Amino acid sequence: MQTLRSPSLLLIPALALGACTVGPNYAGPPRTLADTAAPAGFKRGGPLASPAAPGVAAWWTQLNDPLLSQLETQALAANPNIAVATARLRQARASLRLERANQAPSANASAVYLHARIPGFDFGGTSGSDTGASAVDVYNLGFDASWEVDLFGGRRRSVEAARAQAEAAEANVADAQVSLTADVAQAYVNLRDVQRRIALARDAARMQQQMLKLTQQRFGQGAASDLDVERLRGQVESTNGQIVPLQAELESYLNALAVLTGQEPGALDARLSPIGAVPLPPAAVAVGDPAALLKRRPDIRAAERQLAQRTAQVGVADAARFPRLNILGLIGLGGTKLSDISPDKLVGLAAPMLQWNFLDFGRNRARINQAEGQRDEAEAQYRGTVLGALKDAEDALSRFGHRRETVASLLRSKASADRAADLMQQRFRAGTATLIDTLDAERQRVAAEQNLSAGTAGLTGDFIALQKALGLGWGATPPAV
């Protein structure tokens, strides 16, 4: 029997060396202009953008539309893109668990039985036959283990990189949720706007059809010309023709909402066919400050975590330049009889093995340079993401603020068109206005109402874009998968 004397003493120098970790330590993301812009806040939006901290819950509830809230909930639960992002998060978390497990020893156990019969050899046993063959049985139980001592921190850097990758995947799930909720809300607003425009066009067509009937009667009495009849008939056909593309646009939004909520096209037709009003945003919007935006937007958090991952991978590449120490251990017992499997015949072996690829003709240095280049790329991408996020927020604030002015102007224009159309109708019935003037006034009234509907939908659309730019609603708690 062979025994190992104080094998743990052999590991003390290796464990002491294992405290060394090469490569750069991640010190956080680089400073940007937004880090010093917090006191000043955002530059756009005017008094409509409150500097108060925005909410972190479902922003679409501010639109006060229960059906929209139901669609948002359904989309978050069933949309395939969210499922893809969540699956990638599970993969990243599994990679982190794998890298952590790689730091620990690996062990294997084995049990072997071997029966051999070889002619012409004498194993000290009884000859199997007159041919001179001999048979032998072998029994063995074994246990072996191996452990790579993390002398220069390559394993620890791998765990750092995997952890950062998992956190980036969490942020990507939140980013997918932000984009999805904005897409659902925008498609819903567009649907309501198109429904309104179709209803307005049909109302206009019915009014024009009534005027056509009246004009045809007056033509029969000699009080209207043939030209008046044809002009009005042409106006009716033109208005009906405008409904056809609007109907196709309506069906497109119905299909989009069905797919966004994880259903086949047409599944929401019955539910969304009743005409509803375009939901309106609140009077003021809390936006916070640029510094808070950097912590809130999921794409910025993902870019920062990717930078941390790339920084850790520089350490992984750097550790490959140095020696590697593997400790192998083997314990076995056995023999040619079952009775040989006993503690007094235990065989043990410990074998530290040092490997160092010191002559690689620059391969490791090239890998380090490659990793450093990837880290620099990730840092540049982070800066670009920050600047893009600030631009998105400022643009959205500007559009939202100016759109309110536009809607106020459209309201005044519609009120004026309504009064003009009513006055012209009165004059037409009194015989003091021509049909052409009456049709023109009615056309302007319908156009003003359609413009107001489009402007209102645009205002809500700008509110949705602002919520997306601010990255609201996600990121405070990592998603559970």
Image: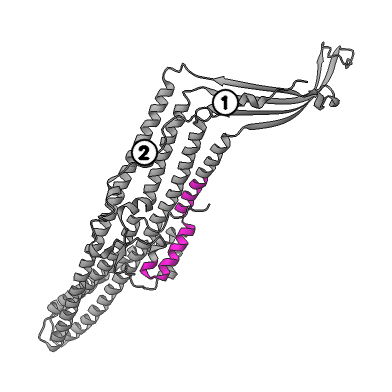
Total numbered labels: 2
Judge from the rendering whether residue 264 lies leftward or rightward of residue 11; answer left or right.
Answer: left
Q: Is residue 409 above or below residue 181?
A: below
In front of the other: 417 or 227: 417
Observer-side mark, 2 or 1, equals 1
Q: Residue at x 34, y 59 (%)?
A: 467
The answer, for residue 446, to whether it is visible in the render is: yes
Q: Amino acid at mark 2?
A: Ala
Q: Residue at x 21, y 63 (%)?
A: 402
Q: Is residue 309 above or below residue 114?
A: below
Lower position in the chain sequence, tag 2 or tag 1: 1
Q: Which residue is denoted by mark 2 in the rendering?
A: 378
Dot 1 lies on which element?
helix
| Coloration mode | one colour
Q: Amino acid at mark 1?
A: Ala
Name the mark on residue 14: 1
Residue 285, given in percent of the width and then of the height, sits at 31, 64
Judge from the rendering whether residue 389 lies leftward or rightward of residue 85; answer left or right.
Answer: left
Residue 19, given in percent of the width and then of the height, sits at 52, 30
Give the CA separation, mark 2 to mark 1.
Answer: 34 Å
Residue numbers of the magenta segment:
61-90
